[in-house]
Image: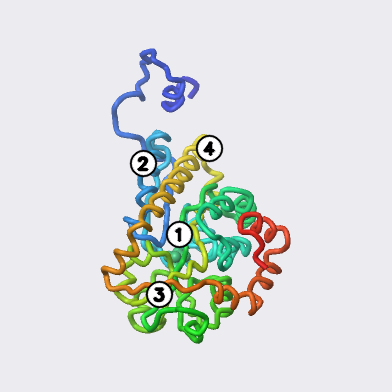
Amino acid sequence: MTNTLNRRTLLKAGSTAVIAAPFIGVGKARAAEFNYKFANNLTIDHPVNVRMAAAIKRISEESDGRVEISVFPSSQLGSDTDTLNQLRAGAVEFFTLSGLILATLVPLASINGIGFAFPNKGKVWDAMDGELGAHVREAISKSGLIAMDKIFDNGFRQITTSTRPINGPEDLKGLKIRVPPSPLWTSMFNALGTAPVSINWNEVYTSLQTGVADAQENALSTIDIFRIYEVQKYVSMTNHMWDGFWFLANERAWDALPEDLQKIVAQHVNEAAVLQRADMQALNVSLRADLQSKGMEFNDPDPAPIRELLRANGFYDEWKANYGEEAWSILEKSTGKLI
Ligand code: X2X
């Protein structure tokens, strides 16, 4: 109807004139045009979900209620691999997922997980907010998914065990260690001489509790938030890889959003990721002492012999060949020469 003005257009016009428009006024907010689901494998109090809760509120407000996002944390809709399939089918519109697990669909997405690649978070953000991140997001965009610009932080990973501290390569021999379902994780822990077991995150606690695995590897924040200290004794600070969570959108669901709504969603998700990175940094300051108070024993192995084991077993050569010269050279702009 030509005389029907869109409430949002009026508000955007910043009109201060009193417009006798029956649809403006305090009343029940209209039903959302876009009711989307956001799934992840993290607890509702994890910094990713805390920051995303605030972002979702702002998205609803700034879209004038046109975009409402419901959160499904803690693998409520299924394992990571199940939920990735739901995302691809459009049954879920948004999903945060490690690039190393996404690599089952987009092989290049695991490149940030190369063993001992990044010396610190500064170099991680240099790569992931720069050329390497852009290169990976372009590959993701060819898979029917869209990745937001800013990757969330899943931290530098440490090895925990119920049996022994890891002081060097000898202690890794035959270690029954859980790894996420990802070709790179399996390849890396095979090259380290362990016996890796691929298990989705939602089954890890019970797998450690029942001895299906004797070890796992994760950031200290994850070890704390998911109470892994209850089923693991030793923490060896290997810093063997950095991992992050891409905020992924189903392409059809993303394209269905008008451009102005896409901008609102992207802006607040990216802001949430940057704030979450700072939360993770702040968490790390106290986590070692906290976990020690919960009974965990820490050691700090020399990474050099462990890294040398990867090199000697051809791990870097294999993955350079898998990713190709271009991607590898982009990675090395941030990490320095890896081979
Ligand atoms: O599965 C894991 O170890 C976790 C929680 O860190 C990821 O989502 C990659």
CA gap between label 1 and label 2 equals: 23 Å
Q: Amino acid at mark 1?
A: Asn
**Image position, residue 220 (x, y; %):** 39, 64
Residue at the image point whose x is 64% and y is 53% from the top? 135
Crowding near the residue tagged with mark 1, few <14, some 14–19, many ≥20 C-alpha atoms within 10 Å: many
From the image, tell me which residue sits under label 3: 160
Residue 311 lies, with reference to residue 39, above or below; the image says below
Nearest to viewer (mark 3 / mark 4): 3
Mark 4 burial class by Cα count in 10 Å: few <14, some 14-19, many 20+: few
Sequence-earlier tag: 1 or 2:
2
- Judging from the image, what secondary structure is the residue with disc 3 in? strand
- Which is more foreground, mark 3 or mark 2? 3
Whether residue 92 is visible, yes or no, is no
First in sequence, mark 4 or 2: give its number: 2
Q: Image check: 38 left or right of 185?
A: left
Q: Callout 4, which amino acid?
A: Pro
Badge 3 or badge 2: first in the primary sequence: 2
Q: Is residue 50 above or below residue 181?
A: above
* Numbered disc 1: secondary structure: strand
Q: Is 337 on the left or on the right of 81, as rendered? A: right
Front-most of residues 182 and 176? 176
> Residue 77 lies in what quarter of the image?
bottom left
Q: Name the foreground residue: 114 vs 53.
A: 114
Q: Residue 277, position in %: x, y? A: 44, 51
The residues tagged by marks 4 and 1 sit, at their Cα atoms, a distance apart of: 31 Å
Whether disc 3's CB lies below 8 Å from ligand 1 is answered: no
